Image: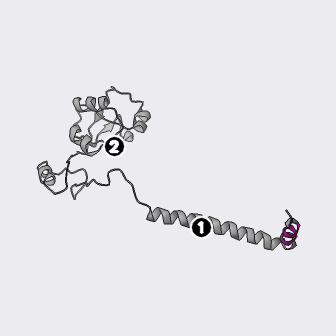
């Protein structure tokens, strides 16, 4: 603390210069932090689950299925280990405002390709063995107050006739 009076006198002599100096240092560090985070975001190694998956779909729309005969052709491609298909189902739950995506899938194939589901082995077996079973995320189940074992009516939106 021997030099404190000298430092204090120099800082107080021209207060406006001191304020501008501290402000410019603050802005410089903020800019450095922001630009460094952008640089890290662009150069960091991206770690996505499923980055080794390839999705093949119709060129017309994701609602148009590919022929099932393509499964064997895709499986024959070098490097392909598993093939699973899904079908888009445009049904609704109770009314049209409750839309969420619904994808009927063959469960055995699906769990081989998408292994990131956090469900128990028993729940997985139950889903595979229940023809009308479904897997829903926690947020969706909480939104509609669904519990395991509930019957959830999904109403198709195509091909219905008023009787």
Colour basis? one colour
Cα distance in 3D space between marks 2 and 1: 37 Å
Residue 8 magenta: yes
- Check the picture and name the quadrant holding the N terminus: bottom right
Q: Earlier in the sequence, mark 2 or mark 1?
A: 1
**Residue at image x 22%, y 57%?**
60
Q: Residue 108: percent from the left, percent from the top?
A: 21, 38
Q: Residues within 10 Å of mark 2 (few under 14, many from 20)?
A: few
Q: Is residue 159 visible?
A: no
Q: Which residues are magenta?
A: 5-10
Q: What is the x, y in percent for residue 133? A: 27, 31
Q: Which residue is mark 1?
A: 32
What residue sits 59% from the left and 67% below the top? Answer: 32
Relative to residue 147, is residue 117 depicted above or below?
below
Asked if 115 appears above or below 147 in the picture, the reply is below
Element under disc 2: loop
Q: How many marks?
A: 2
- Badge 1 crowding class, 10 Å Cα cut-off, few under 14, some 14 to 19, many 20 or more, is few
Q: Nearer the viewer, residue 38 or 97?
A: 38
Q: Which mark is residue 116?
A: 2
- The quarter of the picture where residue 26 lies is bottom right
Q: Residue 143 at what x, y percent from top left?
A: 43, 35
Q: Nearer the viewer, residue 94 or 103?
A: 103
Dividing the picture into quarters, in which one does residue 144 lie? top left
Secondary structure under tag 1 reads helix
Majority secondary structure in the magenta region: helix
- Residue drawn at the location 23% of the way across and 38% of the way down: 107
Q: Is residue 150 found left or right of 24 in the rendered image?
A: left
């Amino acid at each position: 603390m021997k030099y404190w009076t000298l430092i204090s006198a120099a800082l107080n002599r021209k207060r406006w210069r001191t304020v501008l100096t501290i402000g410019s240092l603050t802005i410089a560090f903020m800019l450095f932090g922001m630009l460094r985070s952008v640089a890290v975001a662009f150069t960091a190694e991206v770690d996505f689950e499923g980055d080794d998956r390839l999705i093949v779909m119709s060129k017309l729309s994701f609602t148009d299925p590919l022929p099932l005969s393509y499964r064997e052709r895709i499986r024959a491609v070098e490097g392909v280990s598993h093939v699973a298909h899904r079908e888009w189902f445009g049904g609704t739950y109770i009314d049209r405002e409750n839309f969420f995506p619904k994808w009927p899938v063959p469960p055995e194939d699906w769990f081989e390709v998408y292994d990131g589901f956090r469900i128990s082995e028993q729940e997985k077996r139950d889903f595979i063995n229940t023809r009308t079973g479904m897997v829903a995320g926690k947020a969706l189940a909480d939104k509609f107050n669904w519990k395991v074992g509930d019957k959830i009516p999904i109403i198709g939106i195509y091909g219905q006739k008023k009787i």
